[in-house]
Every structure is written in C-alpha cells, then in structure tokens.
Image (tube, grey):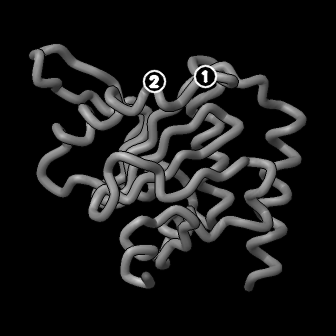
Amino acid sequence: MSQERKQRFEEFILWFNEFVKGDEKGEGQIFLSKLIQAFGNEGIHELGAVCEERVKKKSGTTGFADLVWKPRVILELKKRGEKLHKHYDQAFEYWISLVPNRPRYMILCNFDEFWIYDLNTQINDPVHILSIQDLAESWGSLAFLFPIEEEPLFENNNVEVTKQV
C-alpha cells in the first residue's frame, strides 16, 4: 500500500513540475483536484468538499475560501512564491466563520509549500511545513487527506514536544 501511495505522489509531483506555473486563479482548482486525487480520493465534489466556498466574514463582506472539506480541512491557496505568513489571518477568519463543524486542520499553500495547522492544538504556528517536492517521501503530515482519515505526523507539534519533555 505504501508503494502505491508513493507512486501516486510521484506522479502528482511529475505533473506539477511539468504543468504548474503557480497562478492561483488559473491553476488553483486543477491543482487542488489533482492533490486530492493523489491521496486516493475520487475528487473534490465526491468528498463533499467545496472550492471557492463563500464565507460571510465578521465585517459583513463575503470571502472565498479556496477549499473547504468539513470537518477536516480548510485550504487557502496563494500564487507561487507568496509569503504564506501574510495570509494566516485571512484563512483564520474564514475558519472562524465555518460553523458548524469547523475543520480541524488549516493549510496555507503557495504551490511550493504547505503550512499545516492543527487548530485543535496549535493555532499560531504551523505544526508542519512540507515542500511539495518532498510529498512522495513525507506525506504523513497530510494523512488526514486520505479517504479514510489517518493520524498525521507533524514535526513542529508544540503540544507533543511539551508532553515528551
């Protein structure tokens, strides 16, 4: 099973390297669909997930979350090279409004990196930062994206580090 997963992720990375320039508007939904499929899912809609989910913000305006899969994940995608720390507040504001069944995980992505947050344990710092080029070898931090959710493995989980100390 692990070899099959690795092969799917390697195929995704090959596709990514060949076709993706990193344009959020033009490539975002295709990228998200291919990512979800790399984890063995049929597709975004089959999961009950939504792209460009309309989210009513506290200010009364409407924002558009790039991917919402309740209660698992909200993913906010930005163009390639974008500094992800600048977009935390936007994604968090969307998350606050996603009631009921808020997603446990939040991902900020600029096509090259995934900043992963576990909003049940550590909301201010990513529990893991993953390069897309490392996905085939280090997919464990995104294990919650599999059709049958698996426990993710994080490198920067402050709660776990504190327990171990």
- State the residue lying farthest toward the front: 165
Q: Is residue 49 visible?
A: no
Q: Which residue shows up at 48% across the image and 67% down it?
A: 144
Give the residue pinned by disc 1: 82
Q: Is residue 18 left or right of residue 42?
A: right
Q: Which residue shows up at 41% across the image and 65% down it?
A: 158
When asked about the image quadrant of residue 66, the answer is: top left
Q: Is residue 103 left or right of residue 164?
A: left
How many residues crowd mark 1 within 10 Å: few (<14), some (14–19), many (20+)? some
Residue 3 picture location, percent across and down: 82, 80
Q: Is residue 99 left or right of residue 46?
A: left
How many residues crowd mark 2 within 10 Å: few (<14), some (14–19), many (20+)? few
Give the residue pinned by disc 2: 86
Q: Is residue 137 left or right of residue 83?
A: right
Q: Which residue type does callout 1 highlight?
A: Glu
Q: Which residue type does callout 2 highlight?
A: Lys
User: Pointer 1 and pointer 2: residues touching (CB < 8 Å)?
Assistant: yes
Secondary structure, mark 1, is loop
Q: Nearer the viewer, residue 33 or 66?
A: 66
Q: Which residue shows up at 78% across the image and 23% down it?
A: 21
Q: Nearer the viewer, residue 31 or 109?
A: 109
Q: Is residue 98 visible?
A: yes
The C terminus, quarter of image: bottom left
Secondary structure, mark 2, is helix
Residue 126 picture location, percent across and down: 47, 51
Residue 81 picture location, percent across and down: 68, 23
Distance between the alpha carbons at the discs numbered 1 and 2: 8 Å
- Asked if residue 129 is positioned above or below residue 88 in the image, the reply reads below
